[in-house]
Amino acid sequence: MSIIGIIGGSGLDNPDILQSPTDERVSTPYGDLPSPIRVGSMGGHTVCLVARHGREHTVPPTQVNYRAVISALRQLGCTGILSTTAVGSLREDIRRGDLVVLDQFIDFTRHRPISFHEGFQPHSPVHTPMAEPFHNGLRGLLVKACKDLGIRHHERGTVVTIEGPRFSTRAESNMFRLWGADVINMSIAPECILANEAAIPYASIAMSTDYDCWKTDEPPVTWDDILAIFRQNAEKVTNVLIRAIGGMN
Ligand code: ADE
């Protein structure tokens, strides 16, 4: 039996997916978490679920205490983390409602603590490798779950994480496309970076909710558009998580 962390993104953080749930308050050297951690069972494993933006969605992306989240999941003994996130699509073929199993990120954030290592021990610098930031074993479980459930998905994708909370300008959106990003969000960096620093395998299932603003044949993204697509598709993400965790040893 493993202990798995789930970090739920906007609209994709339903705490009712666990059996026999209890709420745990964990204190960390980095301060408070955006929400209590709901601990329960799923598929024979213990699951620790955190709502990234708080249960009432009161914490904007810049203010999420990513270090406290990862630190708390480490304290609870998590040996893997699956995260969910809503993303805008930067590619025609990544349609609204599609799921993307991310394999790379570009960090375009500017105002967040991005490391646990704020001071080095003498002659012991820490420079964490980040060439393959998403864990391939966990990614494989997410891909398999999408296939088993017959859900339209993309087996890989590069996400660019922006600071937010504003959306991008059209010039930025076009630039991200030229850079090779496939989808855009406001939260994978530094969460994925910190999980790597903490040596906890991390993977993410992203739901495409909009085409950002690079497409000129439709209006630019709004939060209401995103919410509407979440509501229609959230169950897919939940089912993928349940299936993937059920497939773990
Ligand atoms: N999350 C969902 N859609 C987004 C977009 N277009 N930009 C940034 N974050 C998003």
Image: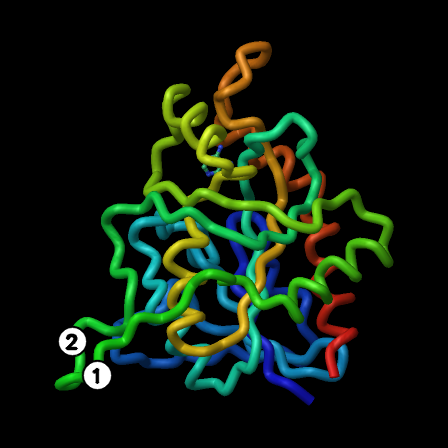
Name the residue located 38 percent from the left edge and 63 percent from the top edge.
34
Name the residue located 69 percent from the left edge and 53 percent from the top edge.
237
Relative to 115, 204 lies left or right: right
Name the residue located 57 percent from the left edge and 33 percent from the top edge.
89
Q: In terms of image quadrants, where is residue 188?
A: bottom left
Q: In terms of image quadrants, where is residue 66?
A: bottom left
* Nearer-the-camera pick, 222 or 78: 78
Residue placed furthest toward the left: 122
- Residue 11: where, in percent of width, then height? 57, 48
- Residue 147: where, in percent of width, then height? 83, 54
Relative to 233, 12 lies left or right: left
The residue wearing badge 2 is 119
Residue 124 got which mark? 1
Q: How many marks?
A: 2
Q: Secondary structure at mark 2?
A: loop
Name the residue located 74 percent from the left edge and 45 percent from the top edge.
153
The answer to whether the residue labelled 2 contacts the one labelled 1, judged by CB atoms less than 8 Å apart, is no
Residue 29 got which mark? none
**Disc 1 C-beta below 8 A from ligand 1:** no
- Residue 35: where, in percent of width, then height? 42, 66
* Nearer-the-camera pick, 92 or 220: 92
- Residue 69: where, in percent of width, then height? 40, 70
